[in-house]
Amino acid sequence: GDSVTQMEGPVTLSEEAFLTINCTYTATGYPSLFWYVQYPGEGLQLLLKATKADDKGSNKGFEATYRKETTSFHLEKGSVQVSDSAVYFCALSDPTQGGSEKLVFGKGTKLTVNP
Amino acid sequence: NAGVTQTPKFQVLKTGQSMTLQCAQDMNHNSMYWYRQDPGMGLRLIYYSASEGTTDKGEVPNGYNVSRLNKREFSLRLESAAPSQTSVYFCASGLVRGNQPQHFGDGTRLSIL
């Protein structure tokens, strides 16, 4: 079945550091890929998405590029802020699995940014 | 714009008690989902409903039942709560198209003693 693998956390960075959170996937079809963010005590919010190969999703300074050849969707940000401290989830939706478009999530990566 | 609303936000139960978690969405979405979130496990799908009148099992359905009351509401019931069901439960809704994201509620934090 489909699966998503994220780098293990937690990740601790200083403010203005460069962030990469790795995400690779396994899917039978051509999935859409998502990054969600969860701030403390809240639900998940969509951060960005990409629906086909070579698409780049971007939002709030975060970027991720859909790489079909390496089955990856790594999240990057050039300069993190304390307010970026959260848990980040990579997810995929594979329409070839049929029925409602279910999301398959990675286990999440906790990011802490120190001032 | 409320989005996805879950009630209650917190609940403590004793083993064997029953309760229903409520979820409502105001975005006219067809699909609704229930997940549980446990440390180190990410989110796991319990049940989902592709449309009003249909429900299907997800990855971890045992011990739970669901009802899609109408297009807006999707409830999750624990008939006889067990400590292993201590978790944070999230409801989500979305359109039935793979390139569209799901929208999540703020969660219900459930502890079973």
Image (spheres, helix red, strand yellow):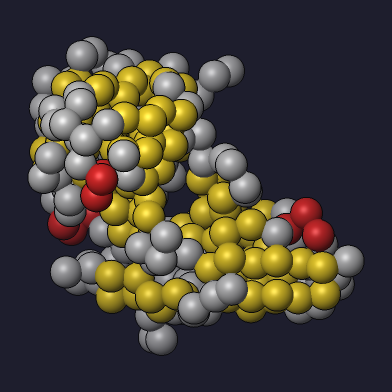
Q: Quick check: can you spot residue B44?
A: yes
Provide residue B8's location: percent of width, then percent of height: 43, 22
Q: Quadrant of residue A13?
A: bottom right
Residue drawn 51% across the image and 45% down it: A44
Q: Quick check: can you spot residue B49?
A: no
Residue drawn 52% across the image and 54% down it: A36
Provide residue B3's location: percent of width, then percent of height: 50, 24
In this figure, what is the number of numbered marks?
0
Residue farthest to the bottom, as pictured = A70
Q: Quadrant of the C terminus of chain B?
A: top left
Nearest the viewer among A81 and B95 is A81
Residue drawn 81% across the image and 60% down it: A82
Nearest the viewer among B30 and A55 is B30
Residue B66 left/right relative to A66: left
Provide residue A10's location: percent of width, then percent of height: 59, 73
Instruction: Check the image and report above or below for A30 versus B48.
Output: below
Instruction: Check the image and report above or below for B78 versus B46.
Output: above
Q: Quadrant of residue B6?
A: top left
Residue B56 left/right relative to B96: left
Q: Quadrant of the N terminus of chain B?
A: top right
Residue B8 left/right relative to B67: right
Q: Quadrant of residue B29?
A: top left
Provide residue B91's location: percent of width, then percent of height: 37, 34
Residue drawn 88% across the image and 66% down it: A115
